[in-house]
Amino acid sequence: MDYFPKWPEPYALPDQEAETIVDTLTAGMFSRFGAAESIHSDQGRNFESRVFATMCERLSMHKTRTTPLHPQSDGLVERFNKTLGQQLAVVSSKHQRDWDKHLPMVLMACRSAVQDSTSCTPALLMLGREIRSPAEMAFGRPLDRPHVPPGQEYARRLQDRPETPGPPGDSPHLRQRAAGECR
């Protein structure tokens, strides 16, 4: 998960071995986006392995980890995993053995959803453009979806945006926390 744009990048893996994770990150994520400056993980043996440490060392990535036995220390990822599980359960078959086939389209939906904390979609912040859905390709852009300005214009608008929009105490973080306390 890239924390600023909230871009999720999960993969369906056959196992949780360190070699599988390193191969998947290298072939899947790093080959498309480049190596990260830092990578944050839980303290699973696969992420604490020599294989994973060697990958981080060779790619000059700083590795950080969550607090032991405290998954809340990576709340954004934990919350996303819960949401992803719920969405996959809805679209998967009765026995949910085909969830991996639905993962790409569910991720497209997640990456296309406007985030309260950024007022943008993860796709716009990560790619500089919105993702065109199959429905949009067939029927056109929805009327309520604004046209995205070209990259440089968009970057200028982001820089000119105030740090904390809205009235004091009305941040997306506070609204999300209040919504969570109501459950």
Image: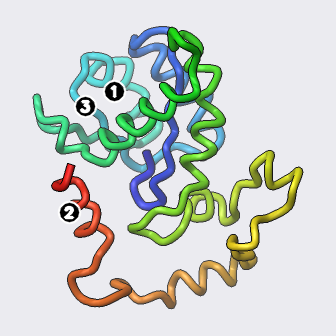
Give the distance between the C-alpha atoms of the residues marked 1 and 3, in whole angstroms: 14 Å
In the image, is 71 to the left or to the right of 172? left
Residue kind at label 3, given as amino acid type? Asp
Q: Tag 3 or tag 1, which sits nearer the N-term? A: 3
Q: Residue at x 33, y 84 (%)?
A: 164
Q: Residues within 10 Å of mark 3 (few under 14, many from 20)?
A: some
Residue 54 location in percent, x, y? 38, 25
The residue drawn where x is 39% and y is 68% is: 117
Displayed quadrant of residue 55: top left
Q: Which mark is residue 53?
A: 1
Q: Position of residue 40 (x, y in %)?
A: 31, 41
Q: Amino acid at mark 1?
A: Ala
Is residue 169 depicted above or below 37 in this figure? below
Q: Which residue is mark 2?
A: 178
Q: Which residue is depicted at the point 58% across and 40% down? A: 107
Q: Earlier in the sequence, mark 2 or mark 3?
A: 3
Going from N to C along the chain, the mark reached first, 2 or 1, is 1
Residue at 42% x, 42% y: name it.
Answer: 60
The residue tagged with tag 1: helix, strand or loop? helix
Q: CA distance from mark 2 to mark 1?
A: 39 Å
Mark 3, secondary structure of its residue = loop
The picture places residue 114, in percent across and down from the top left corner, at 53, 62
Residue 140 rendering spot, x and y as whole percentages? 85, 61
> Badge 3 is on which residue?
42
